[in-house]
Amino acid sequence: MAAHEASSQTRHVKNQTTPESAPAPLTPAWLRYHFDPLPFPARTSALARYARTLAPAAYDSLHHALDAGTPDERHAALFLAVARRDLTTVADALTDPLLRRRALAAAIRLPIADEALEQLALSPVGAARHETYRVLRHSRRSALAARLLPAVHQQYGARDAALLLPACPAETVADWLPRLDPPSGVLHTLARTAPRAVAGLLVSRSQGTSRHRRCATGGHRAVASLAARRDRDAALLLLDQTPDLVSGPAARHLLRWPDRVLEILRDAPPGEDGSPRELSLPPGPLPPSVRRALRALPPEDLVDLARRCPPTRVGTGRSRRVEVAPDGLLALLPAPERDRLVSERTARSRAVRGVPLPTLAALAAADRAPGGPVGGALVAPGLDGVPPRPRAAARARRTVAPCPRRRPSRTPACPGLARAPRLRRTRRRSG
């Protein structure tokens, strides 16, 4: 035992007295020796500074040694090339399956030659083509994408051409979008870059058969809302041709041009029941830009717009908890016009439940009271000589006088449980 401890101490002293030999410079081992002990952010920045300070001959020697090593060493060689902006080396890495993804990521920031990206965009490998399409879009090489679109459509079909469309300019998208059938993800991207072309596509789809129109209305409402918020002409086109697609924030955004909205609503043909076209608005306060545009309207036009823009109804969930926000457009009207408009909506509904809650929330507290001008109109149908309907009367009785809660029964559900003896819990005595 003592001999073993003495030998271990001897080896420990020998390791301390004999220094490690440093690797040769400009080799992968030398890089690992100097840069691996650093944390990752400091290591990458230090390695980039070291790559920029190398002489051309030293860089060529180190890059050649790293490129002939392991996959990690080859990635380090590509990192040195990116840090030194060695465009030829980065372009050659685009054809390497191991280095392609990192080289494409670097091509977004570096001015790589169009020939290298064009060759990769027409590659027979589908994954390489699709990654190149994303690089063309993020690097804003729209002219190159527009030039490649006919060749991609001819060689690989409409699906690949649709994936390349987000990288193209808006004029090319407007020309090619009707020929292709892009998926919903591509439409969401195009709604940001070419909203007018997307609005035209949605209008053409809504004018098809009833089944196609129903699918377009249900599946593209989010795309239409995004396109309407990005461009004014797209929003007005959707409101004029496909009003079912305009809802929520897009409808509120349209009120930034209230004169055009009112003109479209007035010129639109009435519905099947003879009612004029309406634009449902989400309840809540309006943005400052919308309020400024609405206050610039003449008073009679503002009243007509508020009449044609009712609030959406508030739904209740399982908890029956409702958060009501007042109608922002109705709150801008003067008090007499607001009360008259609420009275018109109340007269059209057969019960108080038919009046949207945001409409009632826009009134003053004195007007909502039973003795107020509008509150009296709300309860008047139940106070005149017309008897209420049986179901309405029963519902009112349940609402006014709810049934008392029944006390829980002590009778067991199963008669056999009543004869079962109760087990007495005994405490175990400690020995």
Image (spheres, rainbow, N blue to C red):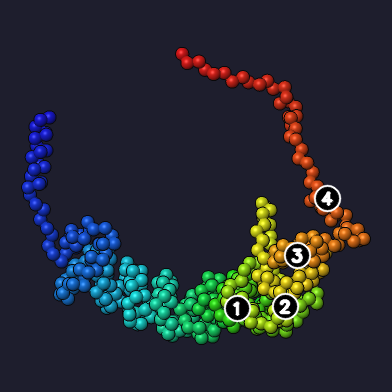
Mark toward the start of the polypeptide (3 vs 4)? 3
Q: Residues within 10 Å of mark 3 (few under 14, many from 20)?
A: some
Mark 3 or 2, closer to the camera: 3
- CA gap, disc 4 to disc 1? 46 Å
Amino acid carrying label 1: it is: Arg
Q: Is residue 403 above or below residue 391?
A: above
- CA gap, disc 2 to disc 4? 38 Å
Mark toward the start of the polypeptide (3 vs 2)? 2
Amino acid carrying label 3: it is: Asp
Query: Disc 2 marks which residue?
Result: 303
Determine whether the residue tagged by mark 4 lies in a helix, strand or loop. helix
Amino acid carrying label 4: it is: Arg
Residue 56 appears in the figure: yes
Query: Disc 3 marks which residue?
Result: 367
Mark 3 or 4, closer to the camera: 3
Query: Disc 4 marks which residue?
Result: 397
- CA gap, disc 1 to disc 3? 26 Å
- CA gap, disc 3 to disc 4? 25 Å
Mark toward the start of the polypeptide (2 vs 4)? 2
Q: Quadrant of residue 117?
A: bottom left
Mark toward the start of the polypeptide (4 vs 1)? 1
Q: Residues within 10 Å of mark 2 (few under 14, many from 20)?
A: many
- CA gap, disc 1 to disc 2? 16 Å
Query: Disc 1 marks which residue?
Result: 292
| Residue 209 percent across, percent down from the top left | 70, 76
Mark 4 or 1, closer to the camera: 1
Q: Quadrant of residue 82?
A: bottom left
Q: Label 3 near label 1: C-beta < 8 Å? A: no
Mark 2 or 4, closer to the camera: 2
